[in-house]
Each structure stands twice: as structure tokens, then as C-alpha cells.
Image: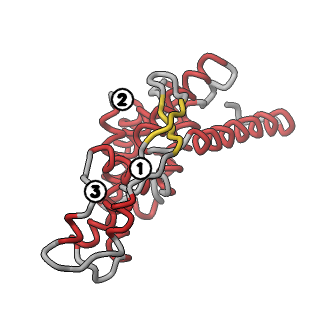
Amino acid sequence: MGSWDSAYEDDAMDTRKLYCKALVHASGGSRLARDWIAGCAALTSPDPSLIYTALQHAATEADVEELREHILGRLLAQESPRRGGRSGGSCDNEVRTSFGMYEESEREVVVPGTGNVAVKRAVAPNCAGQSSIHERDGKDGASEATSPPITSEGIRDAEHYLLQRSREVRCFMYDAMTASLFHSNNDLRTVEAARRHTFWIGLTQFGLSFDELTALWRLVEAELLLKKEKIKVLGQPWGE
């Protein structure tokens, strides 16, 4: 949620509120999860509205989708300067073509409501898309004519390609998992429900793979075990 020093900047506060709302839904929205989010909000910002958001906001998947669009917009803005002086049309054509060059592969498909994935073989190779990048003649838009058709699935795959590499996305999913397990790691049914919910969000909204989400989940579990061990060895005189 940023640093205390930037808390009074309008853009930073809007982003914090958006992050907080999305985190409530992604963590499952339980009372304990909300307590964890509210505690983090109190540590990172002097604005009490964030605490109210964490404790009272009726979060939905739309909040996660809004955060997703915010992160995606920032990633696209960062990508633009790297492409230098290439024209927008040429640049867009190359991006679309690159995501059209699928070879036959195994793809992870989420099983609704479970957080688990099934693997299916899909997508034929697109050799025409691959060659079009190198065979542009610059005349009468001939290069665009050889581009693969743009589909909603192709656009979604391109967005996931960017989101999968985002540190913000991984940190968000880490926070969601941590909040979802706050004081709940002794109840196996609660733990499994939290895992399925957070995995569903990570897979469907951000395109993270099952392996990536599992690595994050194991990190959160390991930190919880370490915390319990520290309490066991050092005690906790200040209480919980």
C-alpha cells in the first residue's frame, strides 16, 4: 500500500483504496482477513478511511478487476517508451502477431470453484504470423494484412503475459493469501477454502500459473509456521 511519506498524494491514496477493496475480496472477506488488512492500512497510511474500507466495504470481483486494469495500464505505459520511435500501428501489429504465434502446447485451464487446474492440449501453430514480422514491405499496409485476426482470447492472453511478470501482482496475491490465513491456519477446511479462492483469483484475473501460486502459498504457510515457532520459543508477552 505504499509508504507513509506518500500517503497524502491523491494518486497514491486512490491506489491504496483500490488495492484495499480488491484485497478484501481476494482474501475471502472474512472478519479475520479484514482485521489483517485494516492493521496493514493503519501502519501504512494516516487516512482512517482505509481502515473503514477494510472493515466495512462489500467487496466483489469487480474490485479485483478494477485493480487488474489499473496494474495493466501502468504496465502498458511502462512498455511504450521501450519501443522507442516505432509507430503505434507497427508496434501494435507486432504485439498482436507475437501473441498469435502459438505452437501446440499444454495449457492450464482452471476448474471453476475449485482453484485446481486441468491440462488440455490446444492451439495450432501460426507460421504466417511469425513470418509477417520479418516480411513487411511497408506498402499499402501489406504487413497488417498478414497479421492474425484479433480475438478476445488473444487479447486476454496478451494481458496475462504482462501481468504474470508483474511484481505488483505477485505481491497482491501474497497479501491476499496472508490475509486469508490470518489466525485461521489450524482449521483445515478454512485453509483449503482460502487456497481455492485465492488460486481462482490468481488464475482467472492475473493469469498466474498453478505452480506460481503454489510457490506463493507455500511461502505464506512457511512464514506462518515460523511465526508459531517464534511464539513457542520466545513467548509473546504482549498477547495476540
Quarter location, residue 238: top right
| Label 2, residues with CA under 10 Å away: few <14, some 14-19, many ≥20 | some
Query: Could you tell me how far apart the alpha carbons at marks 3 and 2 are, in whole angstroms?
Result: 47 Å
Classed neighbour count for the residue bearing mark 1: other residues with Cα under 10 Å, few (<14), some (14–19), many (≥20): some
Along the line of sight, the residue nearer the viewer: 129 or 56: 129
Q: Please state which of the two labelled residues, at mark 2 or mark 1, is closer to the viewer.
A: 1
On the rendered structure, is 230 left or right of 217? right
Reading the image, the residue beneath label 3 is 148
Front one among 189 and 213: 213
Going from N to C along the chain, the mark reached first, 3 or 1, is 3
Circle 2 residue: 56
Residue 114 sits above or below residue 93 on the image: above
Q: How far from the left and from the top, in percent, is residue 203?
A: 47, 38
Q: Residue at x 32, y 44 (%)?
A: 153
Q: Position of residue 141 (x, y in %)?
A: 16, 72
Distance from the alpha carbon under mark 3 to that under mark 1 = 19 Å
In the image, 197: left or right of 218?
left
Residue 45 horizontal/vertical position (percent): 43, 52
| Amino acid type of the residue that numbered disc 3 sits on in the rendered structure | Pro
- Is residue 171 visible from the viewing direction of this image? yes
Regarding mark 3 in the picture, which secondary structure is present there? loop
Colour scheme in use: secondary structure
